Amino acid sequence: MSNLDIAGRVLDLITAAAPGADASMNVERQSQWLTRFATSFIHQNVADEGTSVTIAIHTDGRTATGSTTMTGTDGLRDLVDRTVGAARLAPADPGWPGLPGRSTLTGSGTADEATAAASPDERAEVVRAFVEATGPLESAGYCRTVVWAGAHVNTAGQQLEGRSTLADFDGIARLTGSDGVARLASTRLSDLDGARLGEQAAGDARRGVDPVELPAGRYEVVLRPEAVADLLTNLSFYGFNGKAHNEGRCYAKLGEAQFDPTITIFDDPVGPGRIGVAFDGEGTPRRALTLVSKGVTSAVVHDRRTAAVAGAESTGHAVAGGSSWGPQPVNLGIAPGDDEIASMISRIGRGLLVSDFWYTRALDPRQITLTGLTRNGVWLIEGGEIVGPVRNFRFTQSYPQALAQGNVLGVSRNAVSQPTRTPLSSWSSPALHLAEWNFTGTASG
C-alpha cells in the first residue's frame, strides 16, 4: 500500500472507533544505508528500512497520541484502539489548537533518484576516493544515504505527500595524533567528492603535527564551516523555540538588533536542492523562514500549540516530543557574505584558525552560553599568516555574543552544507571571522 492508502485505512478505523473525533496521522517510510570505515578499511555496511504510523486523536476535550511500525490490518487496528482508549483516560487538554485545514505545499522536498537507488558499491567508491587521497594516513568515518517518503492526512481535510533524499559524509585523517576532518551533506550522493574531502582532511592532519600550547584567553578567530555548524546546532536547540519564547526562556527578542548586521539566519527545508521535509508532524506545510535579518531578530518558530498561545500562525516546526520541548528549526543556515577564508586570515595580527568544536554543553540555555573543546586542528595566525599548529583549548562562550554587533568581521561567500544529528536536515555554514572567542582552558589544564 502507498502511504496515502495506509493513512486512509487508519482514518476509516478512527472514524469507526471514535465518531466525531479530531484526528491526524503521519505515515513515514525511511530507508537509511550506512557505509562505515576505520583504519582506512570499510568494516561495516548496514541498512535500516521501515514504515511508521503516528496518530493523534482529540475527543471529548482530551488528546492522546500513539505510533506503530506494524502496518498490517491488525497492527493498525490495535494502534487505533489503544490510542482511542488512552484519549478517553487522558486529562483534559484545554490547549488543543485544532487541526490545520486543507492547504498546499510550498515545496514537496528534494529527491534525487540516483541517491535513492544508491548501492553499497557506490558509497564504497566515495570512501575509496577519500582513503586514497589520505595516502598513508589512517582514516575513518562514514558515508550515508537516506530516502524518506511521507504522507499526512487529517479529519479536517488535509492531505499531503512528500519525498526527500540525503547523502552525507564525515571523515577524519590522522597522523601521529594530529587529526583533520571533512564533512559534507547534500541531496545527491554525486555531490560527495571523496577525493577532495580526503585531500582536505589529510592536509589538515599534516599541518597539525607537533602543536604548541598557548595560554587561555580571548583570541580573534576564524571559524571554519565545521565549527560554525556547532553554533547552528545550539542556536537551533535554544535560540528560536516558540515555546521557550512564550515562556520568557528564549534568547530571541523580536525586533531587536541582537546580532551583527552581517548576520542573516534562515531556516529553509524546501528551497531547490535543500535537504528537508516539506511538512511537519502536525500537517503544516513548511517554507523558508528568516529568523534574523541583517542582525535583527525577526521570527521564532512555532508549532500549532505555541502559535495559538502567541497569537501567531504555525511555521511548520512541530517536532516529536514538542509538547514538552517545543518547536525547533532543523534546517538552519547563515546567509553567505562576500569574504574568503584566506582574506580573513590575512587581516589578523594575532589569532587562531579553528576547524571544529565538539563535546559542547549548554551552561546557560537562555543566553546560549556553551562550554566545549576544539578538535581536528587549531592554528596560530600572526601577521596575517598561519605560523603553526596549536594544542586544543576548552572554551566558554555565549554564541549570540560572539555574533553580536561589531564582533563579526567577515562572513565567507561559500556556505558548506554540514551533516546534523537529525536525518533529513542540515546546517548551511559559511566560515566566520570573529573579533574574539573566549578560551578558558588548555590541553594541560
Image (cartoon, rainbow, N blue to C red):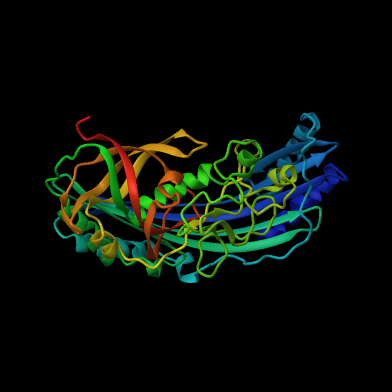
Question: Residue 242: image x %, image y %?
Answer: 63, 44
Screen quadrant of the C terminus: top left
**In this view, which residue lies farthest toward the right?**
20
Quarter of the figure that contains the N terminus = bottom right
Rendered position, 109 above or below 21? below
In this rendering, position of residue 14 left or right of residue 322: right
Kindly indicate the quadrant of the structure image that contains residue 194. bottom left
Question: Dividing the picture into quarters, in which one does residue 440 lie?
Answer: top left
| Residue nearer the viewer, 255 or 188 | 255
Residue at 85% across, 46% down: 16
* In the foreground, 341 or 148: 341
| Res. 322 in view | no
Residue 370 screen position, x and y as percent:
41, 38
**Residue 172, percent from left and from top:** 26, 52
Counting from the top left corner in percent of width and height, residue 305 is at: 71, 43
Residue 26 appears left or right of 48 = right
Query: Is 344 situated above or below 99?
Result: below
Q: Residue at x 73, y 37 (%)?
A: 64
Q: Is residue 233 above or below residue 111?
A: above
